[in-house]
Amino acid sequence: MRREAKEAALREANNVIIPLLSVARRYSQLLFKLANETLHIQVLQTGDKRVSIVLVELPASRPLVAAIYSSVQESRPVSPSQLHKRIVRLRKLVDKLRGRHFVSADIVYIYMTRIRLTVNAYRMARRAGVYVAFGSHHAKRILSRYFMKRVKGLLKKLQGRRIWGKLALLLYMLQELAKASFPEHIELNLGYNVVLAYEKGIVLPP
């Protein structure tokens, strides 16, 4: 039973992690071809596979850290005490990376669960800045919304301006991360060759 639970937790976590890694590795290879640089990518997981931390360096931006707890609990609603212990585990593993692999980062905490939380546990998650996701499909939707929010924020900040180099790569990479996480959610398509955007620039709409 313990082995089955471990495999189930890993399977759910990988459903979220693999699309992120696929995009990150592709853009790392692209950056190497364009500028002879790579993006730092790292995955940490606990032995029971409940906690997974994905660190992805982003061009022209702080790194992204996706901290995911994959719960396989099914017996009863998750209590505040249970949730507190699991959030502490998430934060401890993130703190192991802090200072060694990043100074500051954009961190997204996600608690994946098969069953509901108690009302007080939900409140605790909200106060702690932890997203509650009912399975990997929901977790990917949460990440996609996060990436699209960042894309739209960049477009608003840089509207009407010409961008190129790593800043252009950042915009395209965030869009690709959103697509990879949850394609149905995408509302935007830049429709421009990323290599040309890097080398010659792209003028963003006003």
Image (cartoon, rainbow, N blue to C red):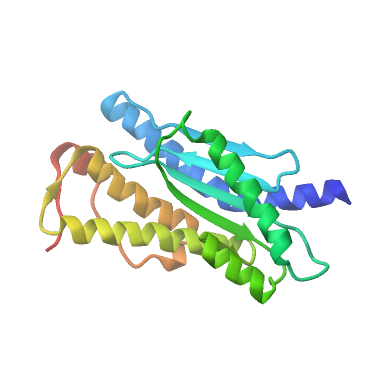
In the rendered image, residue 12, in percent from the top left (x then y), is placed at 66, 54
Residue, far bottom = 119
Image quadrant in which you'd find residue 123: bottom right
Question: x%, y% of residue 79?
Answer: 73, 67
Q: Is 181 or 63 nearer to us in this picture?
A: 63
| Residue drawn where x is 62% and y is 45% of the image | 52
Is residue 154 shown left or right of residue 123?
Answer: left
Q: Nearer the viewer, residue 200 or 42?
A: 42
Indicate left or right for 163 with 98 as reference: left
Q: Residue at x 80, y 70 (%)?
A: 76
Residue extending farthest top: 36
Q: Position of residue 43 (x, y in %)?
A: 57, 37
Q: Is residue 197 left or right of residue 15?
A: left
Seen at 65% across and 76% down, the residue is: 119
Report the residue at 61% width, 59% height from top: 111
Q: Is residue 178 visible?
A: yes
36 and 158: which one is in front? 158
Does residue 130 appear in this view? no
Q: How many marks?
A: 0
Is 105 placed above or below 9 here?
A: above
Location of the C terminus by quadrant is bottom left
Position of residue 191 relative to residue 17, above or below, is: below
Residue 116, placed above or below residue 183: below
Q: Position of residue 15 (x, y in %)?
A: 61, 52
